[in-house]
Each structure stands twice: as C-alpha cells, then as structure tokens.
Image (cartoon, grey):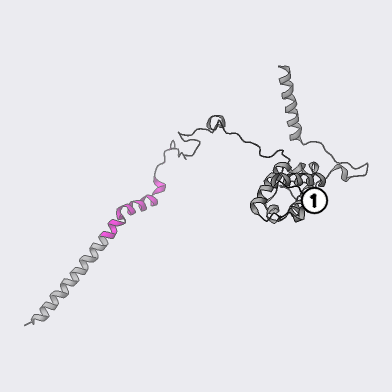
Amino acid sequence: MLSLSRVLGQRVSVHASRSRQLSYSHTRLFIGNFFGKKEVKQREEIIKNQDDYEVDPETKIVILKEENSPDYKPFNPEEDMPDFVIEQWKHQVVKPRDIEATYDTTNLIQTISQTYEETFQSPITQEEFHNASLSDLEARFKFAKSLQQNLGFDISDYTLSKSHTVGELFNALEKVINTRWTNERNPNAIVLRPEDFSAPNVYLNQQPSERAQKATYDRIAEEARNASI
C-alpha cells in the first residue's frame, strides 16, 4: 500500500505540472494576440507576393504640399501686408564696392568726430581718439549704430568686438576704406583698374558684360516707349 504522504506528493507534483502548462499556453496566447499574429502573417504574405498584384495604370500618387493644397493662397504683399513699410535706417547707403571711392582718411575722421559729439554730447579731435574709451558695451553699440548711419555701410561684429577705444575703431575703419574691393564670391580674384597701367599700349577693357548691355538697352527702350505715348 502507498503511504498517504507519497500519494499527496504525486498529486501536488501533477497539479504543479498542469499549472505550468496552462500558464505557458496562456502566455503564448496573450503574446500572439498582443502582437497581432494574424496581421503579421498577412503582412508577410503581402510583402512576399507584392510583385503578383495588379497595378492600375490610371492610379496616380499625389504628394500633398503647399502649392497643391486646396487651402493654398499665394502671398500678396499688397493684400496681406498693406501697411508694411521698410524704412531705411541709414542716412545714406554706400555699397561695399563704392567705399574706397567714397571715403578717405580726412572725411572718415570728420564723420567719426561728428558722430561722437552727437552721441556723447562732447567734441573730440583725432588726437583724443585713443583716449576715448568704448569699454561700456551699451555706449559702444549706440555709437557704432550712429556711426553706421552716417557712414552708410555696415561695421562687422569682429571690428566692434575688438575696438575698445575710438582710436582702435578708427584704425580698423581706415583699413576698410583703403582696401580695394573684391567680390566675396571670388575673394582671390585680381582686381584691375586703369590707373594700374602706365604704358600707353596697355589698357583695361571696360566694356560692359552682355547682361549689363541688355539691361541698359531694355531701360533705354522702355524710356523711349514711355516718351512716345
């Protein structure tokens, strides 16, 4: 005869084994449903047989963007911004290529002295430039903005950041006005001028480009048409 403890041990062992099997089956069923086993299988079949599906030649894929949107409206400055006006904050505008021809050391000194007196309500001479401190950043930016207004061209941030006195700013700007202008797109290009050639048999061809000639022709033609009306 089997002892009671042995029979109970076998029953406990069988119950634990069945519990583990049921738990494992429920886990697999839950994971399969959670990740969508049927959907995954269908997607795999579609990918496998994608070359066998028929394609409608009249079907066109439309990529929606701003231009073909039903709510798209082209920007019209007169309608969308009727009161918007750009005001020129400089008293004059001097293009980079015209700086050398517009300024020399004398009128640069005059402009700096005039701007300093207007900004700080105190006259200054060239000899006092190096003693006039610009260590106060607020005062430096205020003076630099007024100076750019009067000069008509921008002063680089690097020049402003290293100019702690009016004398240092003057020295930096003096180099700017005495530097021959070069195009930023081709900074290493050789810039020639007629005064660079003293020999009579050597000259610089100053004929305008075809684009410039066409622009001049169009302007003259437009003026002639308007005059004849």
Q: Residue at left 39%, top 51%?
A: 47
- Residue in view at x 23 percent, y 62 percent: 26
Residue 96 position within the rendered picture, expressed as x and y whole percent measured from the top left: 74, 43
Left or right relative to 12: residue 206? right
Q: Amino acid at mark 1?
A: Gln
Q: Spot the residue most to the left.
A: 1
Q: Is residue 78 left or right of residue 227?
A: left
Residue 79 in the image, given as x and y percentages of width and height: 53, 29
Q: Residue 101 sits in which quadrant?
A: top right
Against 22, is 153 above or below?
A: above
Question: Magenta: predominant secondary structure element?
Answer: helix
Q: Position of residue 167 (x, y in %)?
A: 76, 54
Furthest-top residue in this view: 229
Start and end of the magenta stretch? Answer: 30-56
- In this view, the residue farthest toward the right is 200
Camera sees residue 23:
yes
Q: Is residue 43 magenta?
A: yes
Helix, strand or loop status at disc 1: helix
Frontmost residue, 150 versus 95: 150
Q: Of 92 and 29, which appears nearest the observer?
A: 92
On the image, which quarter does residue 136 sit in? bottom right
The C terminus appears in which quarter of the rendering? top right
Q: Which residue is mark 1?
A: 126
Q: Pick the residue in front: 32 or 131.
A: 131
Image location (x, y in percent) of residue 171: 77, 53
Residue at x 14% of width, y 78% of height: 9
